[in-house]
Image (cartoon, rainbow, N blue to C red):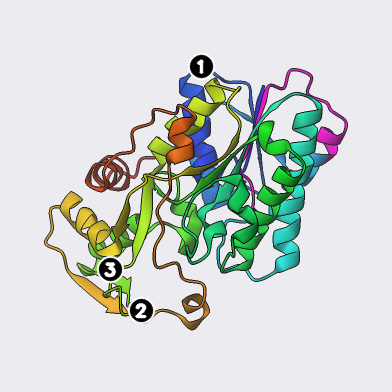
């Protein structure tokens, strides 16, 4: 049996689809109030059973699942603008501790979601070497909640017993429900279809022109390939960056979306909301040194490839993974 927390969400439901395709059908999805929610569509046609998050913890405490072999902990608050630190501590840090302690005690494979938000403004780079964790300074409470768990795991020696993934800018099928936290590919696709134009934030730093801010964009299919490689090689543990290793501009991403639609680029630069300015990352790029040293062979698609597949085979056809 495999458990996926956040299994109705973006990466969780895509992972469920991938595991089903590999023949794994005994999967428990843990999530919150999916009946009638936009996330319900992510689970259509898939093989799984379901539990609400709170009920799951009660049953986990009783160790009810004797045939449990793996937990993919992808369930947490993923809203980078969330300000409620108590909520983030409970959902992103403490919940993860409960699962980690359970998994280690019972010798169960655990993979969990961290985030590139732990790197803050990137002042010391984007290396995932454990020795650098104490120097990291996230720009928002969300990033802090993720880093707090990473640090706790390392302080307790669990980085040798569990596997964490620091996701960079993941985009792809099954993200429709995420609202304002959807990738720009999804939001841009809708903007272009309705207005013929795409809006990007202006830059407020001289070294970056408008739309020239850089992010590491990674297609969800590639992220899944990497996650499942680690799952298939359970002896490889640690906390790893999960990005393409290539920083590209928002302008380049915009061009890829227009190209996939066969349209000429038309971009409007808009003011950045005040509540985002102070926590905005102008540059992210996954350092994949540790990831490659671990032996993971995943090839990360170029932006045109990933965006093209997503737009043409999913967004235009309203398909899900």
Looking at marks 3 and 2 on the same chain, the residue that comes earlier in the sequence is marked by 2
**Vertical position of residue 109 compared to residue 306: above or below:** above
Q: Which mark is residue 315?
A: none
Mark 3 residue element: loop
The label shown at residue 23 is: 1
Asked whether residue 45 is in view, the answer is: no
The x and y percentages for residue 52 are 72, 43
Is the residue marked by circle 2 packed among few (<14), some (14-19), or many (20+) residues within 10 Å?
Answer: few
Mark 1–mark 3 distance (CA, rounded to whole Å): 43 Å
Please give the name of the residue rendered at 47% of the width and 78% of the height, measured from the top-left corner.
Answer: 277
Of labels 1 and 3, the one closer to you: 3
Q: Which residue is mark 2?
A: 205
Point out which mark residue 212 bears: 3
Q: Are the residues tagged 2 and 1 within 8 Å (C-beta)?
A: no
The front one of 125 and 171 is: 125
The CA distance from mark 3 to mark 2 is 10 Å
Q: Which residues are magenta?
A: 58-76
The 10 Å Cα crowd at callout 1, few under 14, some 14 to 19, many 20 or more, is few
């Amino acid at each position: 049996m495999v458990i996926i927390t956040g299994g109705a969400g973006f990466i969780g439901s895509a992972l469920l689809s991938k595991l089903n395709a590999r023949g794994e059908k005994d999967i428990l999805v843990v999530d919150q109030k999916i009946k009638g929610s936009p996330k319900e569509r992510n689970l259509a046609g898939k093989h799984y059973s379901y539990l609400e998050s709170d009920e799951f913890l009660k049953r986990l405490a009783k160790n009810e699942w004797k045939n449990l072999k793996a937990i993919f902990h992808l369930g947490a608050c993923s809203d980078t603008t969330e300000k409620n630190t108590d909520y983030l501590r409970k959902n992103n840090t403490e919940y993860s501790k409960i699962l980690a302690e359970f998994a280690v005690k019972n010798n169960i494979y655990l993979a969990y979601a961290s985030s590139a938000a732990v790197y803050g403004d990137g002042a010391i780079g984007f290396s995932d070497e454990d020795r650098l964790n104490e120097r990291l300074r996230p720009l928002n409470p969300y990033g802090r909640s993720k880093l707090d768990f990473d640090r706790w795991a390392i302080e307790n020696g669990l980085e040798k017993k569990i596997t964490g993934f620091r996701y960079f800018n993941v985009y792809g099928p099954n993200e429709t429900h995420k609202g304002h936290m959807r990738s720009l590919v999804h939001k841009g696709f809708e903007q272009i279809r309705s207005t013929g134009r795409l809006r990007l934030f202006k830059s407020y730093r001289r070294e970056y022109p408008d739309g020239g801010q850089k992010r590491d964009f990674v297609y969800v299919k590639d992220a899944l390939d990497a996650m499942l490689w680690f799952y298939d090689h359970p002896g490889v543990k640690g906390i790893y960056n999960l990005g393409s290793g290539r920083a590209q501009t928002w302008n380049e991403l915009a061009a890829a979306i227009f190209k996939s639609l066969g349209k000429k680029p038309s971009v409007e630069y808009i003011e950045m909301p005040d509540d985002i300015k102070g926590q905005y990352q102008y540059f992210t790029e996954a350092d994949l040194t540790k990831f490659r040293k671990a032996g993971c062979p995943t090839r990360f698609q170029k932006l045109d490839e990933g965006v093209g597949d997503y737009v043409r085979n999913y967004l235009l056809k309203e398909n899900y993974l």
